[in-house]
Image (cartoon, coloured by chain):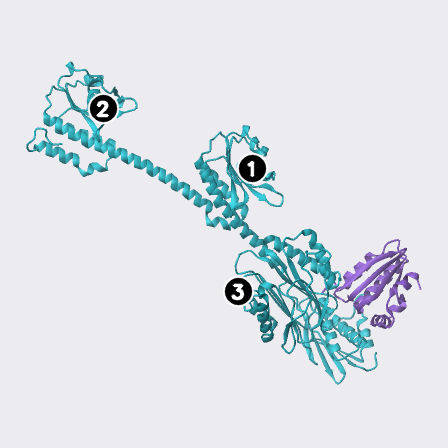
Amino acid sequence: MFPANGGAPSPRLIEALLRVSDAALATLSVDDLLRVLLDRFAEILDTDTAAVLMLDEAAGELVARAAKGIEEEVEQGVRIPVGKGFAGRVAAERRPVVIEDIDHADIFNPILREKGIRSLLGVPLLVEGEVIGVLHVGTLVPRQFTAEDRDLLRLAADRAALAIAHGRAYEAEQQAREEARKALLRLSALQRVSDAALAYLPLDDLLGELLDRIAEILRTDTAAILMLDEHAGELVARAAKGIEEEVEAGVRIPLGKGFAGRIAAERRPVVIDDVDHADILNPILRDKGIRSLLGVPLLVEGRVIGVLHVGTLRPRQFTAGDRDLLRLAADRAALAIENARMFEQQRIVDALQRTLMPDPLPAPPGLELAARFVPSAVGGTIGGDWYDVFPLNGGRVALVVGDVMGRGVSAATLMAQLRTATRAYALEGHRPGDVLEQLNRLIEPLRPTTLTTMVYVVLDPERESATIVSAGHIPPLLVSGEGKAGYVAVEGDPPLGVSRVATYHEHEVAVPAGAMLVLVTDGAVEVRGEPLDVGLERLRVMAEQERDVARLCSAVARGDATRGPSEDDLAILAARVAYLPDRFHSSWPADAEALGGLRHVLRRWLLRLGAGPDEVYDITVAVQEASANAVEHAYSVGAAAFDVEAMHNRGVVTIMVRDRGHWRPPRGEHRGRGLPIMEALMESVEVERGETGTTILMRRTLGGAAA
Amino acid sequence: MTTMATVRGETRGDVSVARVEGEIDAANVLEVGARIRSLVTNRSMRLVIDLSQVTYLDSAGINVIFAIGEELRSHQQTLDLVVAEGSPIARMLAITSLDRAHLTHPSLADAIAGD
């Protein structure tokens, strides 16, 4: 870099050094830098032209890259073979070459002559000893280039070579950056596939969105998802982009058959370069003109749940990179689908549960009822626990608690069927044992893969007794009016669907006024790693201390019997037969539906007073006739109420029925029998019609002469 | 508390039989009445309503039986009733004189035999 002749560097050389080391140059692009360098050296060396030619190694030629004074060189893309002419010699000989008179030299490039250049000085551009090009300067007047000129030009050449090398490195870096950017794009594409927000879309929307994104990332014309129907052993087109017909036509592909079937059966990616030479089952793929296909299995915890495939209308060789990307997308997609599926299942199950739980509970008079259902605290899918309460003939009430083991939609659906069937059989009038036998026969062809247990209780508050039938379920807890609690010894008949010939035995227990029955599923008491008996004992002790049905159910729902929130679903149903005092007052909606309830309370009350069957019947009918009047007098259906007050004093029963409407003369042909009936059945009947309503007062002596 | 009663129908020759079980009151009398009427065909000469399994009957039910009886009469058909002797239901028929409007029998067999 320094003058070859030694001694102190000249002021020109120092200036040149300063000007080519200028930090500002570092920020320029290669072309701009070359232009600036050529300008500055032409000035420092006082030459008319300057040019840079780059070596095209593959062609063995020099190519004009930058020029000053002879811009045509670059514009015309002059190429000079290495070894030929002036520049070719510089490159070939890797040393400076001087031409003092162009007329006597071997010049390849005609532009130099045409421009009238007389003298030339050229030096090679070297990077780590390798020639990468040539830099030369020329004058329009003959000139003798000095050694200093040569050194200065070398300096410029080194700077230019460095800049070019940097520029190349920069370009390489840019390219690397671009690669990185693309990789990042793919990564973000994947993130778009696994976008958590997708999980909250309905499954169909989710799948459509996933396919759009996958087709975009892989630049394919089609994309499709087939879901595995495990029962049928078939893949069912569920979502498609570009081949929407697949879904519309409900295409089903047997496992192992065709393209998608093979992917699912072999649990690995399959590539088809040319559809014409492949075993394709689905005609739609061919009809659509798809040429190439790539498919991967959708796996969740190693289990195939479906197939994801993409296709192109032009032949394409899918690369290993494409395959890996699709696989990755499939993994994310499978997870998203599974999440969405669980989310959707959850909604279905929630809806089923909400629809099926009787809320509010029917409130039969003289009976205190409470129930709770709590979905499990862990897991996320609901199982098949249920409870049900419904009225039967004769003031009796059916109490049901059951548990379809297993989770998700299938458990919930079976539960729903059983719940409905229980009601249907019970209301048809089957005995409790028959109801369970019918259910057992019903469930058998459904081939439940899980166990179903249930306890069915018909509570008769009038007779203060209950009939209990259990299909392998936790026995009911009976709490006496005095607060002693114990599980009813029920013979354990088999769970439902286990044995076609199972018989279900009925157990009668006394449920005196004040006593309470508590039915639960195992989730209410069971703690993992602990014998069931321990939990049952906890519940028994709780029931002895907390005798209010609602508070007991709340405590169990809270997890008090499982020492913390239950890990399983839990259902609890508690029913208490209420005491009826000597004198009671009750209010009823002015609705024919209320009559049945009133009748049964009255019967219970009269039976407790020791009334005979005929007396019970007569008094009940008389009160009903009075109440039916009250219902008819009501201003509007359902909007009003009537009151019944019943008193017992020394064998005399007095009942007052009061409404807040106006007495109406009987209407219609077959009306007006009510009052004569009352008068025939009771010792005295007084009707008082006032502005604010009608009061009927009736009296009858028990044990006396029948009417 | 609907469906407190069930009505089962059968045909014995030209006799239609309606066997009612449960309780009949204002809440379900329309259903019960409609079900009984549906059992009568053009070929029936006679309808027997078997009330022996009825545990509750008040004026609502009595009225509907009266009405059905009149409908049948207008078609030259007859209505017979079955009630257990000495039962509360029998007493209700007596109080309302329904037992004088229609033949009553102590059992279904008697009613079909026409005794």
- Residue A688 in view in this figure: no
Task: Pick whichever, A319 or A504, lies toward us.
Answer: A504
Q: CA distance from mark 2 to mark 3?
A: 86 Å
**Residue A397, image x and y in percent?**
70, 67
Label 3 is placed on what type of residue? Pro
Task: Pick whichever, A79 or A694, lies toward us.
Answer: A79
**Residue A452, image x and y in percent?**
65, 58
Which residue sits at x=22%, y=37%? Answer: A26
Which residue sits at x=81%, y=73%? Answer: A677
**Residue A199, image x and y in percent?**
50, 50
When asked about the image quadrant of residue A347, the answer is bottom right
- Label 3 vs 1, first from the N-terminus: 1
Q: Which mark is residue A71?
A: 2
- Label 2 vs 3, first from the N-terminus: 2
Q: Is residue A147 above or below residue A566?
A: above
Looking at the rendered image, the quarter that the N terminus of chain B falls into is: bottom right
Report the side of A333 relative to B10 (left or right): left
The residue that mark 3 highlights is A565
